[in-house]
Each structure stands twice: as structure tokens, then as C-alpha cells.
């Protein structure tokens, strides 16, 4: 890999591209975004949407599938709210959206952050429960 400095604000790390090719690409995208005011659309290989759609699974939110190893919580902070998504991750890098929440309130106030902090104390039930045992939780 090599780092290519386009100007003082733009540096690109490339594996196979030539410097000239990358400079042309960046100049084109900057022109379309800044001069024409249009969105630059990256062209390249992308999986067919049907292939992705065929991989979809039905599952219930707020219930952790059995193959999930750990949970993470991504947070987006806005002036008037905090939005978060709890994601379950499997050992083979698959993921499930377990829960999505919006905590309304001024993010300068501690009470708004307290709402988010409460999610860390929650327990999440797994999809299957075993007989005569407590439901496994994360």
C-alpha cells in the first residue's frame, strides 16, 4: 500500500492504483460535488440486491438469537435527543439489530444521559429458553 497526497487536505491510501489514476478520480469527484452541486456516485462492483435480500432472516427484536456472542451499542448524539442501536454479533461476523431507541431531551441535561445509561443495566433474553433453567441472558 502507498499513501498518495492529493493536496494538503486530502491523502489517499491505495493498494493497486497509480497516482495519476487516483488524482483524476479525486478531481472528478470534487468537481461533481463542489462545482455541479451533485452527489458523487461511486461506480463499481456491488452485490445484487436479490443476493442480499435472500440472506434476510425473520427474527424478533429485543430477543437475542442463540448464536450471538456479544452485544454492542452504537450511539448518535443530537442536540435534542440521543439515538442508539443495540447490535448482537456472531462469531462469523454476522449481526442482528436487537433494539433501536430514541431518548428525547436536551443532551446538555444529565437526565437525558441517564436514560441512555439505563440501557447498560438491562438484561437481554436469548431466543430459546431451556426447561427447568433460568432463561439464558446476556
Image: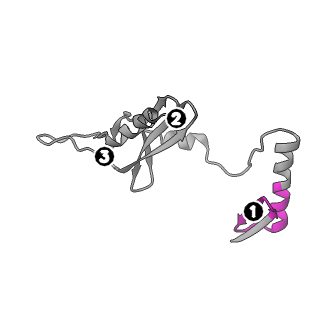
Q: Secondary structure at mark 1?
A: strand
Residue furthest bottom in the image: 1
Q: Secondary structure at mark 3?
A: loop
Looking at the image, tell me whether mark 3 or mark 1 is earlier in sequence order.
1
Q: Nearer the viewer, mark 1 or mark 2?
A: 2
- Identify which residue is drawn at 48% across, 31% down: 102
Residue ID for mark 3: 66
> Is 118 situated above or below 30?
above
Q: Around disc 1, counting alpha carbons within 10 Å, would you say few (fewer than 14), some (14 to 19), or many (20 or more)?
A: few
Quadrant that contains the N terminus: bottom right
Q: Around disc 2, counting alpha carbons within 10 Å, would you say few (fewer than 14), some (14 to 19), or many (20 or more)?
A: some
Magenta stretch in the rendered image: 6-26
> Alpha-carbon distance for marks 1 and 2?
34 Å
- Identify which residue is drawn at 39% across, 56% down: 91
Is there a contact, CB below 8 Å, between mark 1 and mark 2? no
> Is 32 situated above or below 112?
below
Q: Position of residue 64 (x, y in %)?
A: 33, 41
In the image, residue 75 lies in the stretch drawn in magenta: no
> Alpha-carbon distance for marks 2 and 3?
35 Å
Looking at the image, tell me whether mark 1 or mark 2 is earlier in sequence order.
1
123 lies left or right of 103: left
Residue ID for mark 1: 11
Amino acid at each position: 500500500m502507498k499513501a498518495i497526497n492529493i493536496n494538503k487536505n486530502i491523502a489517499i491510501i491505495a493498494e493497486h492504483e497509480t497516482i495519476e489514476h487516483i488524482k483524476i478520480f479525486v478531481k472528478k469527484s470534487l468537481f461533481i460535488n463542489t462545482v455541479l452541486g451533485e452527489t458523487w456516485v461511486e461506480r463499481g462492483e456491488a452485490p445484487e440486491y436479490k443476493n442480499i435480500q435472500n440472506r434476510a432472516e425473520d427474527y424478533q427484536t429485543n430477543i437475542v438469537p442463540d448464536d450471538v456472542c456479544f452485544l454492542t451499542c452504537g450511539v448518535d448524539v443530537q442536540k435534542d435527543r440521543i439515538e442508539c442501536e443495540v447490535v448482537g454479533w456472531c462469531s462469523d461476523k454476522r449481526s442482528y439489530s436487537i433494539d433501536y431507541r430514541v431518548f428525547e431531551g436536551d443532551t446538555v441535561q444529565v437526565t437525558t444521559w441517564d436514560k441512555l445509561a439505563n440501557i447498560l443495566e438491562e438484561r437481554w433474553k436469548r431466543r430459546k429458553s431451556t426447561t427447568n433453567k433460568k432463561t439464558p441472558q446476556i
